Amino acid sequence: MIVDAFYAAPAVLILALAVYTTVVRGTFAASVGFLAYGLLLTITWVQLHAVDVALTEAAIGAGLTSLLLVRASHRLRESEAAIRAETPGLPLKLAAGLVAGIVGGGIALAVLTLPEPAPTLAPQVAANLAATGVGNPITAVLMAFRAMDTMLEAIVVLLALVGVWSLAPDRAWGGRQGPRYNADPDGILAFIARVLPPIGIVVGIYIFWIGADHPGGKFQGATVVAAMWLLAMLAGLTDAPPIRRRWVRALLVAGPLAFVAVGIVGVYAAGTFLGYPPDAAKALILVIEFALMPSLAFTLGLVMAGAPERPEEAA
Amino acid sequence: MTGTTLVGLLAAALVAVGLYGFLVNPQPLRKLIAFNLVGNGVFLLFGFIAERGGLPGIGGDPVPQALLITGIVVAFAATALAVTLLLRLHESTGSTSLADEAPSPKDPAA
Amino acid sequence: MSFALDLLTYVAVAAGAFFYLAGTIGLLRFPDTLTRLHALTKADNLGLGLIVLGLLPHAGGVADALKLVAIWLLVMLSSADAGQLIARAARRAMRRGEPPAP
Amino acid sequence: MSEFLLAAAGFVLAMTALGLVRALRGPGDADRMMAAQLLGSGSIGALLLGGLGIGDRSVIDVSLTLAVLAAFASIAFVTFAPRDADRDEAP
């Protein structure tokens, strides 16, 4: 009984917050609602026995995505009244509600009539886990059984950054991303930006480190590290690097390149792209992980920093 | 009905709410939030299916769970790019309207 | 010994839950932004601290117990800072005489 | 014991939900920002209680991540206007 209530309470709250973010007037309020919603979603992932996903949601969904939305909603505030005039009338709202209801109802029906027993690949993963030398089955899937997905994922994040860079106006082409933040160097913001990052970086590396055998991994760890870098930028303690620099580009591509290189080694050593010879599997996975983690943290931090706004010289 | 079925139904409801918001809200940032609600609904549905395929030793089916992590990261990358695009649109035009501009007299279609 | 530890969990977690209740009552009843912020950032932290204390016997070992304490310290740090930052933003808004946002 | 912890998690969530209703009503942005702060301590408390209640110790690492990122939204909120973000006017 109590267990059921424990499942029900976050679900009800999450749904209420989803409705709130959809119908509330102000976009800022919607963004804050989405932040609260993301934090609660973390609990739901734990209930689904998906702690790795819960960590990802905590770091990326509730952390970075909400931060993006909260900041953007404030910058767009002045244009909000004008755009509200474009809200569709009641007939269109009813039609949209009907469409949404049919889709949602269809999915709900599918949820209630899923086949028994549930299809699963868990036995295969459990049987082959030992061959990878990794203890966390999810890391094994990410780095061995479906390593191609993970490689392309790292490249997608990089492509998103290329997209962000391409949005630079001509005068800031190759320059620094985002505004230059000026906080009082003796203020509370500068204080927390000095105290928190050392702790946060340790936590990020720890989450990365335990990913081999426990829930955790490079994406979650890299997100925490990127967030700490962003914090230092927001407090004006450091600045985004000029993206024209060669070392910036080198650091960004080092991780994905190492991944591809290990993949090509696999062609010769194990007969297939991204194949690992059994006795070297753990070592090759570690090579990828260690190369990818700094690149990912750097990429995620720069993706969050926004389009280039300033030429390199401007302070 | 078990607790996790409730999560499956929550997933369906999130897709519905998000879809509605996506269709009705004119502000692009709101559409983006709605898009993320739909995405979370799909992720939760996938997570629910993963949980059903769990074994005693392993919490849930690790293959879909690993794909979920990939999905969340990719969704974030898309959202970040879209937000930056939107801010640039606002900066250069002063508006975030996605509506077609009023047809000008020279427009042959008008 | 185990009975004493269980008792500690019951008492500390119940006390922690009480402070969450207190924080929420403050949030609901206090008249303006700054007092509500005060209720929120003080009471909930004490509540979390007591819950962490109560959960210590259930942590797997010394490492997990230390992590639990670290969580509490981190939340206190960020809550104290966020409280100040939000309060300043609220005061700036008041000085500008900003109408409440819709 | 497990049931007691889950019940406590539910209670903390219920308190958080009540506070959330108040915080999201506003009227100002600062009030709404409190919702983020409230959910920070509330979700960490509920997560620890619920996770240890169902015997899953890895929630401690999830909570640790949340705790590190807890102040983040509020910091984003105050750095909107870069020039006067952190400067305190003389009283």
Image (cartoon, coloured by chain):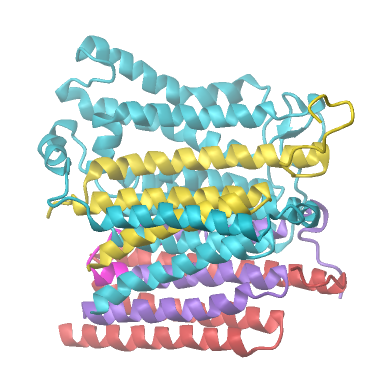
Chain colours: A cyan, B yellow, C red, D purple
**Residue D32 in the image: x percent, y percent?**
64, 70
Q: How many marks?
A: 0
Q: Is residue A250 left or right of residue A263?
A: right
Q: Is A218 displayed left or right of A314 in the figure?
A: left
The quadrant of the rendering that contains the N terminus of chain B is bottom left
Tell me the residue at 31%/46% (across/down): A210
Snapshot quadrant of residue A80: bottom right
Residue at position x 76%, y 60% in the image:
D86
Main SS, magenta region, reads helix
> What x and y, as percent, mark residue A241?
67, 32
Residue nearer the viewer, B99 or B40: B99
Magenta stretch in the rendered image: D49-63
Q: Is residue D54 magenta?
A: yes
Q: Quadrant of the C terminus of chain B?
A: top right
User: From where the camera sits, is residue B43 visible?
Assistant: yes
On the picture, is A14 further left or further right than A214? right
D9 within the magenta span: no
The x, y position of residue D42, in whole percent, is: 46, 73
User: Where is residue A151 shown, x and y percent of the image?
Assistant: 38, 27
Q: Residue furthest right?
A: B105
Residue A31 can be seen in this image: no
Q: Residue at x 59, y 41 (%)?
A: B80
Q: Nearer the viewer, residue B38 or B92?
A: B38
